[in-house]
Image: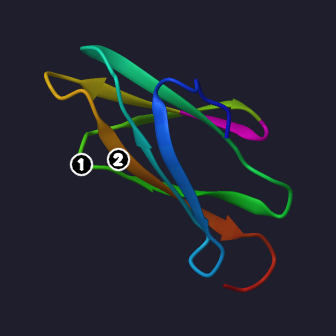
Amino acid sequence: ITQGAVDLTSEEWNAKTRTLSGTSGSLIEGTYSVLVYIPAGFRFGGVVSPANSDTARISGDVVKLSFPIGKKNALSWRVRFDKIGSGE
C-alpha cells in the first residue's frame, strides 16, 4: 500500500482472512483515493467501507479505490484478496 503519511492513520494485514484494513483521517470534502498493490499470487477480492466506492485497475497489480468524502474527515476501509490457484 502506498499512501500519504498524513492521511493514513492505521493499517493492518490479516493473513488468515487475507484482508487489508485501514483508516484514513484528516480528509477534506471531495473524492479520496487509495492505491492498493495486489501482490503476485493474489487478485483483488473486493472492498468494504461505510462509504460507497468506485474501483479502477490502474495497472496489472494496482487498484485505485475512490470514496466520496462529505463532512466526515475519517474513513475506515477493508480490501479482501483472493488467492489464485488455491481453490479457496
Mark 2 neighbour class, 10 Å CA radius: few under 14, some 14 to 19, many 20 or more: some
Given contact means CB atoms under 8 Å apart, are the residues at marks 1 and 2 in contact? yes
- Residue drawn at 67 percent across, 41 percent down: 1
Q: Residue furthest bottom?
A: 87
Dot 2: element: strand
Front position in the image: 87 or 68: 68
Q: What number is the disc on residue 77?
A: none
Q: What residue lies at 25% left-to-right and 24% top-to-bottom?
A: 69
User: Does 42 sit above or below residue 7?
Assistant: below
Instruction: Tell which tag, 1 or 2, sits nearer the viewer.
Output: 2
Q: Horizontally, is 62 left or right of 18 in the view?
A: right
> At 17% across and 22% down in the image, what residue appears?
70
Q: Position of residue 88 (x, y in %)?
A: 66, 85
Secondary structure state at the residue bearing disc 1: loop
Q: Is residue 30 above or below residue 46?
A: above
Along the viewing direction, whichever of 84 and 78 lies nearer the viewer: 78
For label 1, the residue is 50
Q: Dot 1, how many residues are within 10 Å of its Cα: few (below 14), some (14-19), or many (20+)?
A: few
* Displayed quadrant of residue 24: top left
- Image quadrant assignment for residue 86: bottom right
Query: Which residue is under mark 2?
Result: 76
Q: Is residue 40 above or below residue 56?
A: below
Q: Is residue 19 left or right of residue 50?
A: right
Q: CA distance from mark 1 to mark 2?
A: 7 Å
Dot 2 amino acid type? Ser
Q: Position of residue 20 (x, y in %)?
A: 56, 58
Which residue is nearer to you in this view: 15 or 61?
Answer: 15
Question: Bounds of the magenta span?
Answer: 60-64
Question: Please, is residue 85 above or below residue 59 in the view?
Answer: below
As drawn, the residue found furthest toward the right would be 40
Which residue is located at x 28 percent, y 34 percent? 74
